Image (cartoon, grey):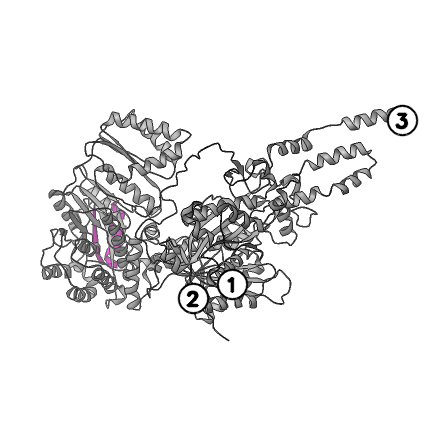
Amino acid sequence: MKKIYHPTPVAIVGIGSLFPEAKTVGEFWDNILTRKNCIKEIVDEDPSFEGYWSIDEFFDPDPSAVDKTYSKVGAFIPEVKFDPVEFGIPPINLESISTTQLMALLIAKQALADAGYNRDESTAAIRDRTGVILGVGGCGNTAFPLATRNNYPQWEQVIKNFGFPDEIVIAIVEKLKNLYTGWRESSFPGLLGNVVAGRITSYFDLGGTNCTIDAACASSLAAMKMAIAELADGSCDAVLTGGVNVDNSILAYMCFSKTPALSREGRSRPFDAASDGIVLGDGVGMVVLKRLEDAERDNNKIYGVIKSIGTSSDGRAKSIYAPRFEGQVKALDRAYEKAGISPKEIQLVEAHGTGTVAGDICEFQSISHVYQQHQVPNYSVALGSVKSQIGHTRTAAGSAALIKTTLALYHKILPPTINVVQPNPKFDLENSSFYLNTEARPWIQPIDGSKRRAAISSFGFGGTNFHVVMEEYQQEHDAVYRMHNVPDIVIIHAGDRNVLIKKCEELLDIFKSESGKKDYYQYLQHTRNKDIPINSARIGFVSESLEQTIEFLEDSLSIFRSNYKDNWQHPKGIYYRTFGMDLKGRIVALFPGQGSQYLNMGIDFAKNYPEMRRVLSEVNQLFYQQKQCILSDIIYPPSVFDENNIIKQKNEIMKTEYGQPAIGAISVGMYKILQKAGLKPDFVIGHSFGEITALWASGALSDQDFYQLAIARGHAMRAENSSVKERGSMLAVNAYEVDINTLIANYSDVKITNYNSNSQIVLGGAEKSIRALYQTLQKQGVQSTLLSVDNAYHTNFVRYAAEPFAKEISQTNFQTPSIPVYSNVTSKPYPHNAEDIKKILATHLLSPVAFQQAIETIYNQGGLVFIEIGPKNTLTNFVSDILKGREHLAIALNPRSQNSSEYEFRRSIVQLLVGGLVLQDIDPYQTPKIIEQPKSGKSVAVNLNGGFYFNPKTKELREKALFEKDTSFLDELLNKQAPSRS
């Protein structure tokens, strides 16, 4: 058989979407990452469901109930404003045009604008060679009412059969007609599926091919297949393609209820053991495609690259709508063959994943078969389905999956699939190539340096199958790119306290006004990266919404009325100072050591900041070269579904061979983010392992030398390397409550390993001795804690590690530190000479950690602001204890493992900015918030949802027909007949 490779790599240069609970692409992506379930129950009284169907009229939990649906949930597009005049549509015609056509216009505008297209002469040439090819369904919200209205002769006859006179029959039929829109000139084009594309080409003056395609639930990818063919043969230079489905009508519910395919539980659970069917969803998703070489030539923003689409038909199957293993396998095989890419190179598969038992099992079996044939390693590919969040959007399903996958490649994040409690046991996941990704995880570059790659499946009724192979365009970002929301840093400053209070009051009024959201976004942009004069009063907080900002401003003003201190802070994270501190020569960077690590530590840094991903990628490559596990998979492991596996993952990260380089990598990534923002510490110090990180931060070690040294230290300290039968143990003791030297006098094997703070000393020794000491202290009521370690660090119990680590140190290239690095061994700065640095560091493993003494030295030499750069806040607490009662500021960037690391990071940055630290752009990657500009001229915009739209006059006639009682005809008839009855 002749092998045909995909001749034309295709770039995605624009995206537009309207999906449940998401008016924009950014909102859609944000909902995906936050695991938002956009499926909800229909409520008759809820005005957002106006134009849909009534639960009272059509719902019955019994699937066999005649003319009823057993589902009352769905995923519905949000209400949007549509200005018919903007699109050249007379307002009177709106009710005659399917909302599918109207929504498609809005999203086409969104996608084309994102690709840089407008309607003026500057883009006339490219527009002339731009086509529109869409998968379309759901035009029935005008077609079916019109068809129903045309049944009036049958209504007349049925009513006449009850013996009513003609004048009453005519009156009843006219009332019934008023329930439906009437025929007008715009009705016919308004109900046609192909006009969805035609309206777009007309309004935007596009000269390429325009048509629509119906391949059922695979329509979006079928349209994309044709769009790529148009690009490949030169018929078009750009194509707007995707899928449109605005049809959560009662007809759609009846169709899927009587198949039956809808979930009785009312939840979309692809691949879960409890999945029992689909949930219907609406949606519109479009992308602008160009040949990759043209997109590069035109300097377009490129979201991702389509390498191939494999297609097939099921042939003869059990039924016209039953999935077939053999057909799906063909589509997959053809896709990878055309792309010239092996399934081994894929890290993410966005499945069709509808949640039907038969469909999910067939799909999993087919894709597992293909991947196993290519020997793809077990548990190496993330599998998911966006239908878990937005339901089955049918003809738009492929576009939803494509956009989700494209944004995943673009943002370097493996997106989650929700509602998976226990995977279907028939999948035998652990012996397959796949894992179900239930949490958003950073997508680190493959260890061989290749591009991140993904695949998408979409299958349709009638036995049609499509499989897409994609890859990222750029492997990492260096400018604005991030579309999902992150918390805002809000800083307000003024000349003095009173002026600041007045400014807060003014902003509160502005933010509460009708234009509050626009004014708030403008304020954030205007104040971003602005220096605060040192003598200015300032207040700051982190906010996740305008509403929260208003709440925090109200809280601040309330505090100002009763608190006149020069600085204060509120538990919600509001920080105030009358003036900033002079921090020249006073900034200290702290780097944590073993024990601070935790599963998924700093995950938001890895999801949101290229610096962190680069560091993890570099460390991964070293691990791979040394034939070790991939470190980022230890820090951010795939989802598991039983307690034993969760415990196993937590135990792995605590091992020194993984924990120490992991802590180092996270600390380095965080430090690089701060460096880019302009942080320049005046002192650096680490705790135990963190001292190596401090040496790196000082410039004494290169990135690669640091990574190698961190790996070597962690590996050398593995307890398995020890030849001593008895392992050591460690005990943290409250130094205020006991005389440590007296306590350990009778234990020759026990020594002080850590002078952590005024209140904490750590002891190390034989496990038997440490446990005896612990029991003694418990009886005395002295606070003490047995540490979860696999040996007694900084004692002779780890002598087995000292020699190999010293050897690694001797082979490492050290430079003169550019920042003073304070040693745990001497509590003084390291010397400048490389050989002297090596000598001190070689004794580090067996020497006590003199952290308390070093902090005192730094403080006496001017250190005032201590910033802990790495996981948790252990060192911050030590510093606060050491310097208790003395002026200082100790802040951890990632203090709590339970909270969002992005939120905690920004909260820490606010404290530093309010304290007086000068930083530039702490986040150069976030796309600016969209500020909607008021339209010029008179607007006749109406609110549209996915239901029926009626003009005000039609709506009035409908309501009269349904609710206005008129018995005049009947009364007159009865009066006429009264004498004859007597």
In the picture provided, is 326 more to the left or to the right than 115? right
In the picture provided, is 530 more to the left or to the right than 464? left
Name the quarter where the C terminus is drawn. Answer: top right
Give residue 151's quadrant in the image: top right
Contact (CB < 8 A) between labels 3 and 2? no
Q: Earlier in the sequence, mark 1 or mark 2?
A: 1
The residue shown at (70%, 41%) is 149
Q: How many labels does the image show?
A: 3
Q: Can residue 377 be seen in this view?
A: no
In the picture provided, is 591 more to the left or to the right than 549? left
The residue shown at (70%, 37%) is 177
Res. 378 mark = 2
Task: Provide residue 181's location: percent of width, then percent of height.
Answer: 65, 38
Give neighbour class at mark 2: few <14, some 14-19, many 20+ (Cα, 10 Å).
some
The extreme bottom residue here reads 1
The residue stretch that appears in magenta: 759-782
Task: Provide residue 168's location: percent of width, then percent of height.
Answer: 78, 32
Tag 3: amino acid: Arg
Task: Provide residue 292's location: percent of width, then percent of height.
Answer: 40, 59
Task: Provide residue 808's location: percent of width, then percent of height.
Answer: 18, 66
Mark 1 and mark 2: Cα distance apart in space: 14 Å
Q: Is residue 155 visible?
A: yes
Give residue 595's quadrant in the image: bottom left
Tag 1: amino acid: Phe
Query: Which of the two discs, 3 and 2, sits closer to the camera?
Result: 3
Residue to which mark 3 is pinned: 981
Residue to which mark 1 is pinned: 364
Tag 2: amino acid: Asn
